[in-house]
Image (cartoon, rainbow, N blue to C red):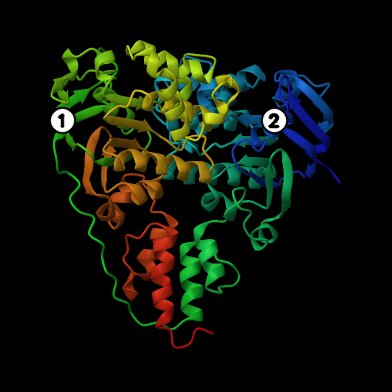
């Protein structure tokens, strides 16, 4: 039997680390298999990917025991460059993979290095850009793209290389829902049609589970589950390691078999099992979201990145927006819609070509950025753009010193901010030894140590596993409950709807919606047009709304409560 990848008794410990990142790993991957690797942050998923393309042990050094075989190649003795024609890898941080000055050059770079004929390269580039929704981006500079567009660019570059084995480390993390669906469909169809092997590391189980053949669950560097998807799902949850999607867990609770993987599947099985009456639902009053003192006022601003280009589209077009003290506002929209560009105007990192931004009664154009930063905390989408020190403690001290905080307060502020984000145990850790999710928490702690009245967080769930993502939003909610005004940019509309009352949707640099987030959830046409995906729980609530269940429910707890009431009316729950 032919094998594409084989791990033989592999244990790997990074140089200087106390514990192995991977321990006693044994598994094989057959040609054409589509495998999901999942598990909590820090469980060894990325290290496992590095082993397949040879970055471990050749780039990331350490104690490497055992063997990894990629077809006939032993990665111990094969160069990374030599494996590149076989293994195409998409990294967790797309920016670290970008090497050229235009999107077209980036996508062509791999095939050019493999000596592919020019005509075929042009065709591959065109196909890859179409598959990843980047048509028309040929001459754009990759480092000026949004995080999601950069991720799409990297996926396009690997797609154009046509490797035999695709290894993708959280390729969906920065993509909007429409982009996730399209990229997943393209990559999976390609793997199936061409018999390619696909190893996919993901936390987004709802999107991925219906498409894979097999699931491997890692925890603390070891394989804790490995098997066909049905077997893994029937084995149940592993607390803080593997949690099945809410729809599936609800299906299990209400006795639906086989376990449903989609909202539609749940509804059909529920109808077959239960005959129910309608219920009355008490709508909890969300209250007004724009009351109190106005702290941010954006007045008719427009902005373009390339002022000299005649055909350069404006990134923002006539935007007007106000935010009051104590609000939590979710800023939503497809990749490249202008979300990050908008919030960068609030902190003075960008200035509008027309219009005005006022923060706490200060005209941002006339106020130094360092002065604004005392009141407005900003967490970048990519924490590597924000980190300036090697050590966690020093990273927080840097901001405190820069803002003239009394050194006598340093220790208490450092302790308080790290404790708030559950990173106190890492106070003396080297920043660049941390994972992406941990770095995100360090930047949040650094910002919180300054005690800003306004907090802006760009994609807070980047690099976070589901439990860490929930924890980050709980942290943000605690801040908001204590009076901090919060603006969150996110593609995680389920988290946004569970924590924020108000949503602002951008599309092509314009505000398309500004209102209660539950009103957005029930406007399916607007959601689709804005590349926003209704959470699976809300899709199910919408299907069941004919029985009195509110169509805007988001959390599993809310939906469970509503379905439970519905089942109580059943005359034949058999």
Q: Are marks 2 and 1 in contact (CB under 8 Å)?
A: no
Disc 1: which residue: 297
Kindly tell me whether residue 432 is visible in this rendering. yes
Using the rendered view, name the quadrant where residue 411 is placed.
top left
Q: Tell me how far mark 2 sits from mark 1, CA to CA.
A: 50 Å
Give the camera-side residue of 43 and 353: 43
Q: How many residues crowd mark 2 within 10 Å: few (<14), some (14–19), many (20+)?
A: many
Kind of element beneath mark 2: strand
Judge whether 399 appears above or below 12 on screen: above
Q: What is the quadrant of residue 31 in the picture?
A: top right
Q: How far from the left and from the top, in percent, is residue 211? A: 59, 52
Secondary structure beneath dot 1 equals strand
Few, some or many residues within 10 Å of mark 1 (<14, 14–19, 20+): many
> Where residue 490 appears, x then y in whole percent?
38, 39
Query: Which residue occupies 47% across, 17% down?
Result: 395
Give the number of the mark in front: 2 or 1: 1
Which of 69 and 66 lies nearest the eye of the viewer? 66
Looking at the rendering, in which quadrant would you find the C terminus?
bottom right
Tag 2 residue: 87
Residue occupying the point 58% across, 29% down:
91
């Amino acid at each position: 039997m032919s094998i594409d990848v084989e791990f033989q008794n592999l244990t790997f410990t990074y140089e200087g680390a106390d514990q192995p990142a991977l321990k006693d790993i044994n598994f094989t991957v057959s040609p054409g298999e589509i495998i999901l690797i999942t598990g909590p942050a820090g469980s060894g998923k990325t290290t496992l990917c590095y082993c397949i393309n040879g970055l471990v042990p050749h780039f990331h050094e350490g104690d490497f025991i055992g063997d990894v075989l990629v077809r006939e190649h032993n990665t111990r003795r094969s160069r990374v460059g030599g494996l590149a024609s076989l293994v195409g890898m998409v990294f967790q941080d797309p920016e670290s993979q970008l090497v050229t000055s235009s999107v077209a050059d980036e996508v062509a770079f791999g095939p050019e290095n493999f000596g592919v004929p020019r005509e075929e390269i042009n065709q591959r580039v065109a196909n890859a850009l179409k598959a990843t929704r980047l048509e028309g981006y040929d001459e754009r500079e990759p480092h000026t793209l949004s995080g999601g567009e950069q991720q799409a660019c990297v996926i396009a570059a690997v797609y154009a290389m046509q490797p035999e084995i695709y290894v993708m480390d959280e390729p969906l993390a920065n993509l909007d829902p429409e982009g996730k669906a399209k990229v997943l469909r393209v990559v999976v169809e390609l793997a199936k049609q061409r018999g390619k092997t696909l190893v996919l590391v993901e936390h987004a189980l709802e999107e991925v589970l219906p498409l894979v053949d097999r699931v491997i669950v890692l925890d603390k560097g070891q394989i804790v589950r490995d098997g066909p998807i049905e077997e893994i799902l029937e084995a149940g949850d592993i607390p803080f390691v593997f949690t099945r999607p809410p729809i599936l867990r609800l299906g299990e609770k209400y006795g639906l078999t086989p376990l449903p993987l989609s909202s539609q599947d749940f509804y059909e099985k529920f109808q077959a099992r239960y005959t129910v009456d309608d219920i009355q639902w008490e709508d909890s009053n969300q209250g007004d979201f724009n009351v109190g003192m106005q702290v941010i006022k954006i007045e008719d601003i427009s902005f373009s990145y390339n002022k000299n280009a005649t055909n350069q589209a404006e990134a923002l077009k006539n935007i007007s927006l106000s935010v009051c003290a104590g609000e939590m506002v979710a800023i939503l929209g497809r990749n490249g819609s202008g979300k990050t560009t908008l919030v960068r105007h609030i902190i003075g990192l960008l200035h509008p070509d027309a219009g005005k931004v006022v923060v706490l009664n200060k005209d941002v154009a006339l106020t130094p950025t360092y002065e604004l930063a005392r009141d407005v905390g900003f967490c970048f989408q990519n924490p590597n753009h924000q980190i300036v020190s090697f050590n966690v403690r020093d990273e927080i001290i840097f901001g405190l010193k820069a803002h003239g905080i009394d050194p006598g307060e340093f220790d208490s502020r450092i302790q308080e901010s790290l404790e708030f984000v559950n990173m106190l145990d890492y106070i003396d850790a080297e920043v660049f030894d941390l994972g992406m999710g941990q770095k995100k928490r360090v930047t949040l702690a650094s910002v919180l140590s300054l005690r800003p009245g306004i907090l802006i967080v760009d994609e807070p769930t980047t690099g976070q596993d589901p439990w860490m993502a929930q924890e980050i939003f709980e942290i943000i909610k605690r801040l908001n409950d204590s009076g901090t005004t919060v603006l969150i940019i996110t593609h995680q509309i389920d988290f946004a709807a569970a924590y924020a009352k108000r949503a602002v949707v951008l599309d092509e640099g314009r505000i398309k919606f500004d209102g209660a987030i539950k009103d957005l959830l029930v406007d399916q046409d607007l959601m689709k047009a804005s590349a926003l995906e209704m959470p699976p729980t809300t899709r199910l609530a919408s299907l069941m709304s004919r029985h009195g269940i509110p169509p805007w429910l988001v959390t599993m707890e809310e939906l469970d409560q509503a379905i439970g009431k519905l089942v109580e009316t059943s005359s034949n729950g058999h």
